[in-house]
Amino acid sequence: MSGSDALSLPAEEFLPHRAPMLLVETLSDYADLAGTVETTVAEGGLLLDDSGCLEPVALAELLAQAFGVVKGHADRLAGLEVREGFLVGIKKAEFLRPVRAGEALRIAVRTVATLEGFTVAEGEVLSGGETVASGSIKIWVPKRALSTGEGA
């Protein structure tokens, strides 16, 4: 990424997910609402099929979690509270080959449009420089943290 900051920030600083649903590990690059997140596909993970490959829906979730990490970092840099976001749509998803447990992945995401709390982001999942999945996702990020108490 041109003009990016090399980082090594834990993904869990920016996401509500925890194992086994936390699929991404570290934010490694960030610049201008785009970034790269890295992970290694966990052996025995919940989202593996019988042959030890990630289910396609997990690849879309990787894009969403990577976006959440990038957005959280952007908010923190702007002095804002890190807010939860919700995956509300997936478009143009391509799953080019199976991804096996143990593979190291880089997930590159970039914001392409934002309007009234909704963001469209595009991304690619790469293994060893090879694109294994790509797609466009739509995320809703509420302006404030959602209340989770009784009567909410």
Image: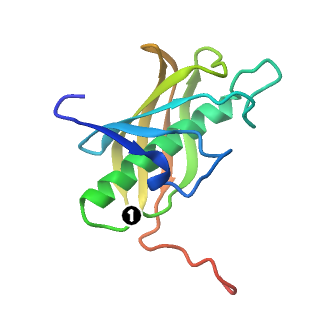
Asked if residue 55 is positioned above or below residue 52 in the image, the reply reads below
Pointer 1 residue:
116
Residue lying farthest to the left in this orientation? 3
Residue found 34% across the figure and 52% down from its top: 73
Residue found 30% across the figure and 53% down from its top: 74
Residue lying farthest to the bottom in this orientation? 151
Dot 1 surroundings within 10 Å: few (below 14), some, or many (20 or more)? few
Q: How many marks?
A: 1
Residue type of the residue flagged with mark 1: Glu
Residue found 51% across the figure and 54% down from its top: 15
Q: Provide residue 23's location: percent of width, then percent of height.
A: 59, 39
Q: Is residue 78 left or right of residue 112?
A: left
Q: Provide residue 72's location: percent of width, then percent of height.
A: 39, 55
Residue found 57% across the figure and 52% down from its top: 88
Quadrant in which residue 38 is drawn: top left
Q: Is residue 116 left or right of residue 2?
A: right
24 or 141: which is nearer to us? 24
Quadrant in which residue 29 is drawn: top left
Q: Provide residue 33's location: percent of width, then percent of height.
A: 29, 45
Say whether residue 28 is visible: yes
Residue lying farthest to the right in this orientation? 50
Asked if residue 24 is positioned above or below residue 129 in the image, the reply reads below
110 or 76: which is nearer to us? 76
76 or 144: which is nearer to us? 76
Quadrant containing the C terminus is bottom right
Say whether residue 14 is visible: no
Quadrant containing the N terminus is top left
**Which color scheme does this rendered protein use?**
rainbow
Q: In the structure shown, which secondary structural element does the residue marked by tag 1 occupy?
A: loop
Q: Provide residue 102's location: percent of width, then percent of height.
A: 62, 21
